[in-house]
Structure formats: structure tokens, C-alpha cells
Image: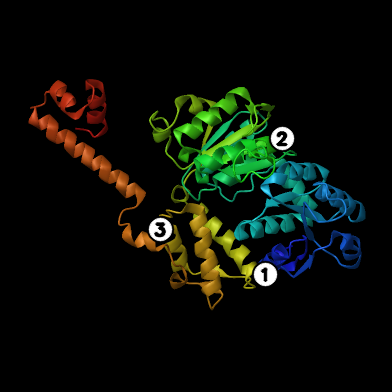
Amino acid sequence: MNLSQANILVVDDDIDVLTAARLLLKPEAKSVTTESNPENLRRLLRDDAFDILMLDMNFNSALNTGNEGVYWLRQIKEWKKNIDVIMITAYADIDLAVRCLKEGAVDFIVKPWKNDQLVETLQEIIQKRDNPKKKEKEHNNPINIVGEAESLQLMFRKLEKIAPTDANVLILGENGTGKDMIAQAIHQASLRSKQPFVKVDVGALTDTLFESELFGHKKGAFTDAREDRVGLIEAASGGTLFLDEIGNISLQQQAKLLTVLQNRKITRLGSNVPIPVDIRLITATNVPFAKLANEQFFRKDLIYRINTVEMNVPPLRERGEDIMLLANHFLRIYGEKYVKPGMTFAKAAQDKLMHYSYPGNVRELQYIIERAVIMSDGSTLSVDDLVFSPIEQYQTDTPQTQIDNLEDMEKNTIIRVVERYNGNISRAAKELGLTRAALYRRLDKYDI
């Protein structure tokens, strides 16, 4: 089943939220029904067949306890057990949202939401809801990533070994390689899979927001703290905390995070009462490990904490035939989405896809195929339908070419210095800033 075939019900007492949801989802779904009064839920569920229900956590109802979402979720599950419910929540309600997951909600979204992420979430849920065999298969093998490259298979085997443990994992890889999917796969295959998976883009948090979002705060802790807020670390307790872009946080933020990981306790801003937390930590970054190892950039003691196991996600340019596997995968998805089924690639288009360097990796390939499907007038995608990133026009060297150029430069420099000192290895090594042993290894490497 596809999102375009789904009937969606959105229940929220905020008219602006209902309008935003209707405008976003109307082009994507078969039907979108909005309702501001949860008292009408039973009638709506009796009279219409909805696939997904998006339900707000709080209403201006007689209950007015802050637990309205939990109450209505329980009612909905009594009236219609098979409907998938997504909770709509503010950051301050995350602890309630986690309770709702335990009560049978399939997911929760934080408002204001990001449109593309909401659509993706709905698409994933709707594709699984009517296929219990697929759900069971994915539960037993959660690595739902397209690819057959040996480097990817090695990563999968490592994932299967570490997922059932509570080991902290550091995922390294370029932008667009799918680090967040790997993190989710680890969580789904872990013993915490039924508990929350909380993702935080820590690289986007300022110093001010860092503590408030991760640790939470008490009412009055600062000017805009109008109510108590549960931090995201506390919300993830019992489950998995995924800190994305960990390599972009400041040394001050690193020190605060290290304290939490050492003590396994957080203290909300405005409070002096420590709260125990039980999390499995997964982190990810596109920063090379060599840079993380530089203590001027990243604390070594924090590296030891987050890097019990390291996983490297290979870039798309190193995955060979996976490029066409992924291209055909995206072609089927967007062919269905834009009602252009059965599309294929011309031979020249396949050659063009195979010889591109993909600086944006899988994410870039996905956007290339989606645009091509939208703009194409025929059932076969040609070379002209495939429009690559304008940035590539200014990149004359592929990453491998750049590496080759650097090696040529190093080799030529060594030859020049050795000749300058008439073969005196000690003096040449000193000039190059190398030990004698290191220089001998390079002489052997370049067959000098």
C-alpha cells in the first residue's frame, strides 16, 4: 500500500495545525480529514475507514490534565485496534509521548514538524501496516538498506553482532550515506527495540539550547521557561539516544555530555536534583576520525566513551553496482508516487549514473531520480533527464583523483629532497619532518 492510497485523520484543537496538515497531505494521500474535537472520534472511526490517525497530546477539553493524549489513545485502541496512531506533541510533552508508544502508538512527531520528514514517516508506516509478513521479516532482519557491495555486507555483519548488546556505537560516513538508517537498524535489532528511539541533531543546537533540549529544564529556569520540560536524554531512557553530527559540538558541550555519560544522570536546568537515565548511545558524524582524534578539536575521553564500536558507512562511489540497484529502487518508488509505473533507464543514462562521483551519496542519487521522473515525458529516462548537482560542474577532480594527485605530490617531494642531499636519508628525513623508518616506508611504497 502507498501513501497515495491512504485515508488520514488529523485530530487537533489548533485550527492552524489542522490547516497545515491538510495543505501538506492532501496532494500526498487519498483523503485527509481534520477534526478539532476529540469527542467526535468514535463517530468518525465508526463511519469511515482510516489508515492513520494523527492525534494531538493536549486538548481544551474537560479533562485538561495534560494526559488527554493517553486517554484518547486508549479509547481509540478499544474502538479500533488496527488503526495506526501517531501522536502530535511539543517538546514539553515528550515524556507523555513515550508513554503513548507503550500504550500502542506507532510513532510521535514534534511540532512544528518538518514537512518532508512527516511525509516520509507516514509513507513508512503505511507501507508496513497491511503486510504483516513484511513486518515480521523486518523485525527479524531490520537492515532494510538496498545494496550488495562487499563493504556494505561487512558492515551488516558487524551490525548484527553489536545490535543485541548495549555497546555505544560511533557511525562514521559522509553526508548522505545513510548513517541515520544504520542507527535505526541497530535500535530495531536491539533488546531495546520496543522502547523509544530519540534522534537529536546536536550539531544544530546552540550552547544555550544544548542543555535545555538534552537535559530539560524547570519552570522559571530562564526567561522563556514557562513550564517544566523533559529533556531528550531523559525521554530516551530505557531506549536508544542517537546524537547525529556529534563531531560539530563545541568543547564546552562535549564536557557537559561527558559528565552525563560518566554518571548516567542528568540534572534539569533550574534544578539540583539528579535524575538517573538508562540509555544506549549511538552517535554519528561526517567528520573524519583523524580530526576527531585531535584533542584541540574533540576530547579524547569523550571519544573513548562514545566509540566502544566504530562503524564506517561506505560512500556510494565505492559501492559499484549498488548504484544501479539503488537507482532502480528509487525509480520504482517515484514511478508509483507520480503515477508513472514501469519506467526504465536508457543504456546511456545507466552509463552516466555509473560514472558520476556522487558527492551527496545516496541522498543525492535519490533526488536525481525523483527529479528525472517528475520532468520526464516518456517511459524511458534518457541522459538529458538526469541532472546532476551544479556543484559538480566546478569539481574537475573526483575524490580518487585528488588522492592520486596528493600521492604524486608526496612522491615528487621525496625524490627532490633525497636528491638535494645526495641520498643522505637522515638529512632528507629531517628536512621532510619524518623519522628514518617513515621515510624508508615511503621509499618502498613509491619504489624510489
- Which residue is label 3 attached to? 355
Numbered mark located on residue 43 in the image: none
Secondary structure of the residue carrying tag 2 is: loop
**Is residue 302 left or right of 12 when viewed as pictured?**
left
Name the residue rendered at 78%, 52% in the picture. 58
Whether residue 154 is visible: no
Name the residue rendered at 51%, 46% in the picture. 204
Q: Residue 121 is drawn in which quadrant?
A: bottom right
x then y, percent, for residue 328: 56, 61
Q: Residue 167 is drawn in which quadrant?
A: top right
x then y, percent, for residue 331: 58, 64
Q: Nearer the viewer, residue 195 or 211?
A: 211
Within-10-Å neighbours for mark 2: few <14, some 14–19, many 20+: many
Numbered mark located on residue 192 in the image: 2
Query: What is the spatial separation of the Cα atoms under label 3 and label 2, in whole angstroms?
Result: 41 Å
Query: What is the spatial separation of the Cα atoms under label 3 and label 1, in whole angstroms?
Result: 39 Å
Name the residue rendered at 70%, 70% in the picture. 26
**Is residue 147 left or right of 18 when viewed as pictured?**
left
Please report whichever mark, 3 or 1, sits nearer to the chain's N-terminal start.
Answer: 1
Whether residue 163 is visible: yes
Numbered mark located on residue 23 in the image: 1
Mark whose residue sits in front, 2 or 1: 1
Q: What kind of residue is marked 3?
A: His
Q: Nearer the viewer, residue 182 or 10?
A: 10
